[in-house]
Structures are given as structure tokens and as C-alpha cells.
Image (spheres, rainbow, N blue to C red):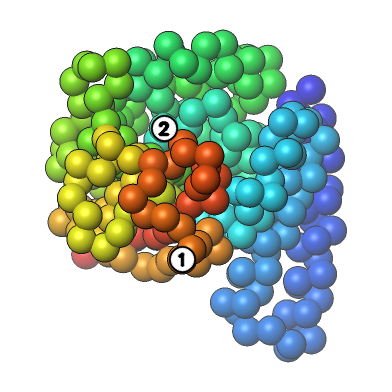
Amino acid sequence: MYLRNLAASAAGLLLLAACGQQEAANGSAPPEQNESMDHAARAAAALSDPARPEADHADDALRKPANVLAFIGIEPGMTVFEMEAGTGYYTELFSTLVGADGEVIMQNPAVFDTFLGDAVPTRVDGRLENVRVSKTNFDNLDAEDGSADIVTWMLGPHELYYTPNGGGPLGDVEATYAEIARVLKPGGVFVALDHAAADGSPETTGGATHRIDPQIVKDLAMEAGLVFSGESDVLRNPQDSYETGVFDASVRRKTDRFLYKFTKPEEE
């Protein structure tokens, strides 16, 4: 089932990519634009995969995955470590994008089982053959040194300051960002997406309103040795009410969300 659907998606991807290649041959687009077009074509192919669950399609308008995926820039054969994958909305898309020669590590803390239920095995088992499920805290990532091309953390960095069910934290803050840097290959990228808190907000907003000041994420990633290399405003919403918790009906799924990219320096 997975390979058949992957083949269908690949055919669509090749057709879309061919259009970009023709423009390049005609000299109508610079190399960086062609690369962007290629990532957009891959995103469109993944989103049109007939194997995607209907519930995922229903989320697309709010999540704007075509823009997010194009920003991340996943290529076939890559290894993607997906921190805090949740029920797997992005896991599904990453799986298609890396293809049969790639791998996605779908990570969630074990304590998340209490509210994820059977969502993860339903998503993965017998369907996504290139996905490996991992249950660890954020400061103990289940991957070898320098093994991941991309690490993503979608709507998650604030969770370091959240203690579910009155338990302990889900990872030491500095150790978590050190782990992200450890598992990335030289030249690999870390992509962070989260609900924004007002500038200057304390870390504790992560546990209180499930938001975080974007500068905190930027500072921690850079302190771990990563280089800030890009951002997208596709999910920004300056009309957000920053003091309101993200699950409040007045802002739910309409929050101001920042999307950052960091790069691990190449070895000298």
C-alpha cells in the first residue's frame, strides 16, 4: 500500500519538477528560485497523495503545509528526526517526501501516550514503512551523532516548560538543544515552529499559555552552536491576543506562529 501510493506521488512530483527544469533550461529562473520551485513541487505532490487521511486534508487550510514544507526543504533519501510528532500530521508528509530510501523518526515523550491513545500505531503500522517510532524525552533523542539531515519541532519548543499531569519536565532545556545539534549532520537544519508569546515574555509562559517568546528559541539554538539561517512569516498573525492560552476558543488555531530555520555549521 505504502509503496504503491509513493509511486503515484513520485509520478506527480516528477511532472511538477519537470516544469521547473524547463524554466531553468530556458534561463528564466535563477538556481535558488529553481530550488524553491522544486521544494514547492514536492510539497504539492505530498499533499495530493491519495493515501493521506481525510482528517489531515481538513487541517490543511489552517496549517498551510505547502508553505511550511517548501520552507523546510526535505529531499528524497533524507533522514528527518521529528520531535514531538503528536498524532503524525507532518509525519505522513515527511514520509512521502523522504521516499523509500529515507527515514523519519517520529518522536514523542512516552507520557504523551495518555492522550495520543492509539493514534500513532494507527498512523504508522502497516502504512508508513520508512517511519520509526521513538518514545524519549527531548533531552535524550534516539539517534546517532550526525545522523539527521533535518530536525523539526512543530508547535513544540514551549513544551520544555510544561509539566504534564503534575510530573517533571520533559527535558532539560540546554541539554535538549545540545541533543538537536548532536544528531544533526554538519550542514543539517533545525526547523522550529511554535505559538508566539509577546516579546520579553518569561519562559514560564510555555507552561501557562503554551506560548514562547521567539527570541528564547533563537538564543537557545544559537547557544547550542546552530546558526540562524531563515524564517517564514506564512503563519504569523499580529492580531493575536498574546496573553491568551492557545486552547482558548478565541485564538485556537489562529495564533501568531513563528517558523525559524537554523543550520549546523559544516566541519572545518
Residue drawn at (77%, 31%) of the image: 54
Q: Position of residue 37 (x, y in %)?
A: 68, 69
User: How would you rate the neighbour count of disc 2 (Cα within 10 Å): few for under 14, some for 14-19, many for 20 or more?
Assistant: many
* Picture quarter with the N terminus: top right
- Compare residues 181 and 217 and report the one nearer the observer: 217
Q: In the displayed structure, does residue 20 sit left or right of residue 38?
A: right
The answer to which of marks 2 and 1 sits earlier in the sequence is: 2
Which corner quadrant of the image does residue 145 belong to?
top left
| 53 vs 77: above or below | above
2 and 1 marks in contact (CB < 8 Å): no
Which corner quadrant of the image does residue 112 belong to?
top left
- Which tag is nearer the camera, tag 2 or tag 1? 1
Residue drawn at (68%, 46%) of the image: 60
Q: In the displayed structure, does residue 135 sit left or right of residue 165?
A: right
Q: Which amino acid type corresponds to the residue marked 2 in the rendered image?
A: Glu
Q: Which residue carries the number 2 mark?
A: 84
Q: Which amino acid type corresponds to the residue marked 1 in the rendered image?
A: Pro
Residue drawn at (73%, 38%) of the image: 58
Q: Position of residue 266 (x, y in %)?
A: 29, 62
Q: Position of residue 102 (x, y in %)?
A: 56, 38
Which label was assigned to residue 148? none
Q: Which residue carries the number 1 mark?
A: 238
In the picture as drawn, the residue positioned furthest to the bottom comes out as 27
Spatial CA span between label 2 and label 1: 26 Å
In the picture as drawn, the residue positioned furthest to the front comes out as 250
- Compare residues 118 and 182 and report the one nearer the observer: 118
